[in-house]
Amino acid sequence: MLPRMTPGLLCVALSAIALSAIVQAASPPYDVFPAAEPPYYRVRYEASTQPGELVYAVNYTIWIPADVKSLRGVIVHQHGCGEGSCKSGLTGAYDLHWQSLARKHSCALLAPAYEQPEKADCQMWCDPRNGSDAVFQKCLVDLGAKSGHPELSKVPWALWGHSGGGQWSGAMLLLHPDRVAAAWLRSGVPTLKPNPDRPAMKIFPCPDAALRVPVMCNLGTKEGVTVKDDRFAGVWTANRAFFTEMRARGGLVAAAIDPLTSHECGNQRYLAIPWLDVCLEARLPAEGGEPLKAMPTGDAWLAPLAGAEAVPAADYAGDPLAASWLPNASIARRWMQYVKDTAVTDATPPPAPTNLSLRGNTLHWEAEADPESGLAGFMIERDGQFLANVPEEGKNPFGRPVFQNLQYSDTPTQPLVPMQFTDAKSESGKKHTYRVIALNTVGLKSSPSAECVARIEP
């Protein structure tokens, strides 16, 4: 569970927690995570007691596409505050949908997991000036050496963050605008001006270079837009202040209000991933380490801050510097679907599963997620007939059912769901022909996998 928030605060800061409690080494729930064998790599750093350094232990897990010779960027999936959200970061790099975005752009997918004790002050990591900036950049050097990709320390960053992770991502944008290709801030933003509702939040300067980076402020309507007395009601106030300051200066910033949720992530990935896709396509240099390209602005659409309709910028009747900035018509259409009911549509089927094999009476296969709509599950065929759905029924309490299931902070559940199916009704000694079909989250089917013809061994 996330810690209780007072109105206007995104993270609970309990200064009475003793430093000795804050700097504890890894202990449950941070001692159980998936194995990190290539293409996964992991580094962990102990907590520091030195002034200005990170007071929590942290591990970073990275996934690198197997066929990438030189990385062009790194996508950072940053969890939020509280023990539950921090624990959820342990699986962020294993998310098949986010991997599909990274693979498309020859990027790595990185997920930090700060080992913050329950009720401790999350500002000690989600304000990068408290040491998390330096450790993050150190991890890029160390993971680059470990993975054989030294360019990792120099490539641009695409930042996604939830709650305190949104604050961290936005703050990293302000501190390093020349390194950030785009930033998606779910339910958390840095503070640009003193705010009486957020007196504990330290102020960040906003350099002109940050205004040229596309930013999406994303929050649930129950975080102060339509519900004013919820524990997260201050989120809208903070987002509106951040948006207004950035956009008034010409910043390429938009807001997307989820009409269904409060602080949970919901279905945001079906807008976040296509939005980041457009930003990465436009901004990533051909070679890692080269400067980011300027974000094109000629095809932009605009929409009222809390509205639901977007139009081409040339047709917008209101003040353009008070309107959400959307990069093109495709994203504008997805944005309009999202703010209406989050039912972002997709007409493209998922990729077909590969490497289907039978071991005993258990099928194993591999599959990539649909970049637009992710992966909901699989259909198993035996001898040309439907046999089973995997899973039988998808689970996700926070949005569309997905194959890997999802936690509060948009990461897969543990243990990770394997791609396998045991044919308990197969006949020993009989030859069967199997195929597997992938389904995305809007119900579209892939082409079938190649057939696996095998005899069930007794």
Image: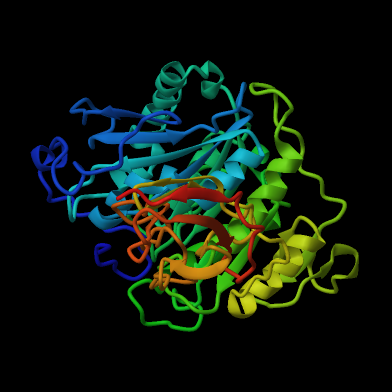
**Left or right: 234 with respect to 269?**
left
Q: Seen from this angle, which residue lies furthest right?
A: 314
Residue 360 sits above or below residue 240 on the image: above
**Left or right: 439 with respect to 456?**
right
- The colour scheme is rainbow
Locate the N terminus and report the quarter of the image it occupies. bottom left
Residue 74 sits above or below residue 219 on the image: above
- Which quarter of the picture shows residue 339? bottom right
Can the viewer see residue 195 in this picture?
yes
Q: x and y percent of residue 78 in the render?
A: 42, 47
Q: x and y percent of residue 7 in the render?
A: 34, 71
Count up the numbered dots: 0
Residue 53 sits above or below residue 252 on the image: above
Identify the residue at image location x=22%, y=28%.
46
Q: x and y percent of residue 276 in the render?
A: 64, 50
Identify the residue at image location x=75%, y=69%.
333
Query: In the depicted view, which residue is nearer to us: 128 or 329?
Result: 329
- Which quarter of the picture shows residue 394? bottom left
Query: In the depicted view, which residue is nearer to us: 229 or 437?
Result: 437
Q: Seen from this angle, which residue lies furthest front?
A: 429
**Left or right: 82 with respect to 78?**
left
Identify the residue at image location x=28%, y=36%.
58
Identify the residue at image location x=62%, y=22%.
70
Can the viewer see residue 203 in this picture?
no
